[in-house]
Image: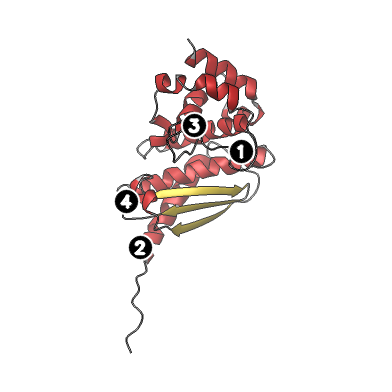
Amino acid sequence: MEGMKHRINSGKEDMEEAEKQVEEGLDLISEKLQKEIELYIDVCWTSQDFVVEEMGGSTGKAINPSWMQVKFNSKADNWKINLKSTTVHEYVHTWFFEKNSGRSKIMWKHIIEEALTQHFSKELVPEANHRKSTMFSREEIAEYWPQIKEKELEKKGTDFYKPLFINRSSSEYPNWLGYSLSYVIGQELLKKHTPEEFPELGKEDIIRVGDRIFLQ
């Protein structure tokens, strides 16, 4: 009887290369933002099509201040550099969780958090895929700013970041608008505040910057 047909997607070389990219990403960001608690990182393969087609072969998730996950698929072009960028991005989330006593639970705080993750991943790994940060121009974001300011900033609860950040339907906001919004606002905030000050910023800081750059 023949053995079951199967295929192992990730090989030893891919995993070793992935771990190398993660280590390099950690070296880059830890020089900018230092964590006080130990960080555990899961590195694994993903077969999700959208990661290859839309994310450049890399995705991740920060679970809590001491635990993050990064996933990769070596079939995508530039997956190595994108994995390094994802590592930076998720590390910043864990740093923010540490300073913020946990995950952001309200939209305006999440925008500040994402502003910092987008900034550092783009600054430290500029050659990576940064579609989320740059997909929408200031002029395009400005069309939605009055509605965002009125309806979104105080939003809480399960999946509060939808549909501003992730929207697979055709209603309200285009998909990933929140990431570009956060990046643009973050670049303005960084002109007056250090990254270390971001966890202490408030909703009024977002509104002040947003009104200045989107309503003028």
What residue did someone put label 1 on? 96
Q: Can residue 45 be seen by looking at this rendering? A: yes
- Disc 3 on helix, strand or loop? helix
Percent coordinates x, y for residue 48 in the rendering: 40, 55
Percent coordinates x, y for residue 73 in the rendering: 37, 55
In space, the residues marked 2 and 4 are separated at their CA atoms by 16 Å
Relative to 75, residue 155 above or below: above
User: Quadrant location of the N terminus?
Assistant: bottom left
Q: Earlier in the sequence, mark 2 or mark 4?
A: 2
Circle 4 Cα neighbour tier, 10 Å, few/some/many (<14 / 14–19 / ≥20): some
In space, the residues marked 1 and 2 are separated at their CA atoms by 33 Å
Q: Residue furthest bottom?
A: 1
In space, the residues marked 1 and 3 are separated at their CA atoms by 18 Å
Q: Are marks 4 and 3 in contact (CB under 8 Å)?
A: no
Q: Amino acid at mark 4?
A: Ala
Q: Are marks 2 and 3 in contact (CB under 8 Å)?
A: no
What residue did someone put label 2 on? 13
Tell which tag, 2 or 4, sits nearer the viewer: 4
Specify the quadrant of the image occupied by residue 138: top left
What residue did someone put label 3 on? 178
Tell which tag, 1 or 3, sits nearer the viewer: 3
**Foreground of the two, 75 or 83:** 75
Relative to 159, residue 216 above or below: above
Label for residue 76?
A: 4
In space, the residues marked 1 and 4 are separated at their CA atoms by 29 Å
Circle 1 Cα neighbour tier, 10 Å, few/some/many (<14 / 14–19 / ≥20): many
Q: Are marks 2 and 4 in contact (CB under 8 Å)?
A: no
**Foreground of the two, 171 or 115:** 171
Q: Amino acid at mark 2?
A: Glu
